[in-house]
Amino acid sequence: MAIRIGSTLNALRLRATRQWYLGRALRRRKQVQPVRVLMKTVPRDAILCFVTQRNEAVRLPFFLDYYRNLGVGHFLFVDNNSDDGSADFLLKQKDVSLWRTTTSYKAARFGMDWINWLLFRYGTGHWCLTVDPDEFLVFPHCDTRSLQALTHWMSTSAIKSFPAMLLDMYPDGRIGDQPYRAGQNPMEIARYFDPANYMVHKNGRYGNLWIQGGPRARSFFGRTPERAPALNKIPLIRWKRNYAYISSTHMALPRALNIVYDEDGGERISGVLLHAKFLSSFIEKSSEEMERGEHYADSQEYQAYSAALQDDMTLLTGESREFEDWRQLEHLGLISSGNWA
């Protein structure tokens, strides 16, 4: 009886938490002003991609082409007061709806209030992919099957959400040695990743797995690994109006969206987000973001980056692997095909 009462109380608390975050998003909806909205022409079965960006002009050409080729039908961007021409570039794209805000990224829960509002308003009934401009989804069979094939199988299998571990990619030399140009595949430069040494534990309240490790943990947070960035994400969800992201895309509510792993010894389908953060443009970006102080924990992560980058550090080690394809990642246990043969 005590267990049942505790479970009921936790469910009520989580419901209240979800309603609170949805309320935040609704109250802040006027912070994002529409620049061009094309949603009336978007098919009901289109896969939508939601993105917050600031000064990512050099990254956007490849990012858009990558996800178009994967199967995204329409992009919904929030531009956070860019001054590098990226908003003008987005307005030239026929499959992009654009909103603009000049308000604080930090005060909007690092942009998630804005994204939750757009998901609430436009995402219902769609499979919705929420990513950053430096994140590239890789899933089993992605070289031969589209994102539509994946989401169709998930729908028929009653799977509502798809997990992807953030896999930090890095070059074989100093981060600034190879200039990155617009339109270039970032993995031509950032070709390497850590195949192991990841720490995983379960979040008892929300039910999601919490993953840390990789090159950022060992190189920037070696003395305080518990403060290393979280790598677990749930970027792809068949959205309903009462859903909400709670902490970036690390976890969502209702709680069932976070139960993306099998506790009975089997494996559920999962992917990775290739995280192409460590390009030449990152050096300038890290200095800018550290000064702005608009990121989590007063941008302590960017402070760690800036201090290390001044020493011309490299992230490559003898254990690093060069990225090949999704099969390599499955062999290493970083993704799983589950029952999707």
Image: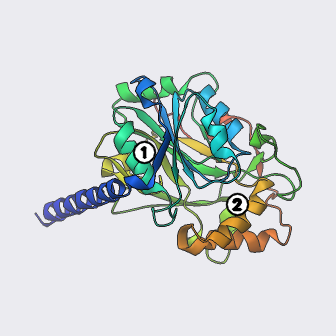
As drawn, is 278 to the left or to the right of 261? Answer: right
Where is 224 relative to 192, above or below? below
Residue drawn at (15%, 60%) of the image: 4
Q: Looking at the image, tell me whether mark 1 or mark 2 is earlier in sequence order.
A: 2
For badge 2, the amino acid type reads Pro
When asked about the image quadrant of residue 207, the answer is bottom left
Name the foreground residue: 49 vs 105. 105
Give the alpha-carbon distance from disc 1 to disc 2, as whole Å: 29 Å
Of the 4 image quadrants, the one containing the N terminus is bottom left
Q: Position of residue 183 (x, y in %)?
A: 76, 37
Q: Which residue is mark 1?
A: 265
Q: Element under label 2?
A: helix
Question: Callout 1: few (<14), some (14-19), or many (20+) C-alpha neighbours within 10 Å?
Answer: few
Q: Which residue is mark 2?
A: 215
The answer, for residue 332, to whether it is visible in the render is: no
When asked about the image quadrant of residue 189, the answer is top right
